[in-house]
Amino acid sequence: MRRIYFLVPNIEITHKIVDELKTEGIEERHIHILAKRDTPLEGLPEAGVSIKTDFLAAVERGAALGGTTGLLAGLVGLRFAGFALAGGPILGVIMAGATIGSLMGGLAGMNSGNSRLKKFEEAIEQGEFLVLVDVPKDRIDAISQAISKHHPDAQFEGIQPILPPSY
């Protein structure tokens, strides 16, 4: 799956695009709309927290950093405690570090906007709508061309790299 972006000037065109995407077989869970704060979306699928923020990326960084810190703490403990600390306790310290790191990273990530969407902030604040659509790689051209053809006011803004599989 890849995520394609469209900037749309108003809610009427956004509704038409969402309806067209649904007729193309795109499920609503793969359509995400970002708008200016407090803008009523009138039934459009609003983007979730994981899209609006850097939550997932921060969790991954926090888990890596916390796991590394846990490993170092375990090795230091092993050095000073001798062989009393075997593999099990060290693994426990690594897991605890990764857990704490991912929690702290996730909290930090929720407080920062999605870095990939920074370039759209000004347009969104001016009242435009950002439509994000998750589509299979082989349908990117067909979907983007259909939207551009039927809605010339909608600007195709690019493709996000590979997304994890969704279920």
Image (spheres, rainbow, N blue to C red):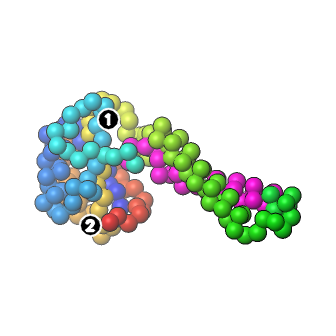
Q: Is residue 158 magenta?
A: no
The image quarter containing residue 124 is top left
Decide: few, some or many residues near mark 1? Use Cα within 10 Å; few <14, some 14-19, many ≥20.
Answer: some
The part of the chain drawn in magenta is 51-76
Residue 149 vs residue 131, the one in the foreground: 131
Find disc 1 in the rendering and name its residue. Answer: 124
**Image position of 128 with respect to 70: above or below:** above
Q: How many marks?
A: 2
Residue 76 vs residue 43, the one in the foreground: 76
Q: Earlier in the sequence, mark 1 or mark 2?
A: 1
Residue type at tag 2: Arg
7 vs 54, left or right, is left
**Image position of 161 with respect to 9: above or below:** below
Residue 122 appears at what percent x and percent y? Answer: 37, 32
Per the picture, the main secondary structure of the magenta-coloured stretch is helix
Assign the C terminus to one quadrant of the image.
bottom left
Assign the N terminus to one quadrant of the image.
bottom left
Residue 84 appears at what percent x and percent y? Answer: 81, 66
Residue type at tag 1: Ile
- Give the residue drawn at x 41%, y 63%: 164
In the picture, the disc for residue 44 is: none
Residue 8 appears at what percent x and percent y? Answer: 24, 42
Callout 1: SS: helix
Decide: few, some or many residues near mark 2? Use Cα within 10 Å; few <14, some 14-19, many ≥20.
Answer: few
Callout 2: SS: helix
Find disc 2 in the rendering and name its residue. Answer: 139
Q: Is residue 65 magenta?
A: yes
**Image position of 21 with respect to 16: above or below:** below
- Give the residue drawn at x 43%, y 43%: 53
Farthest front residue in view = 84
The image quarter containing residue 79 is bottom right
- Give the residue drawn at x 26%, y 56%: 29
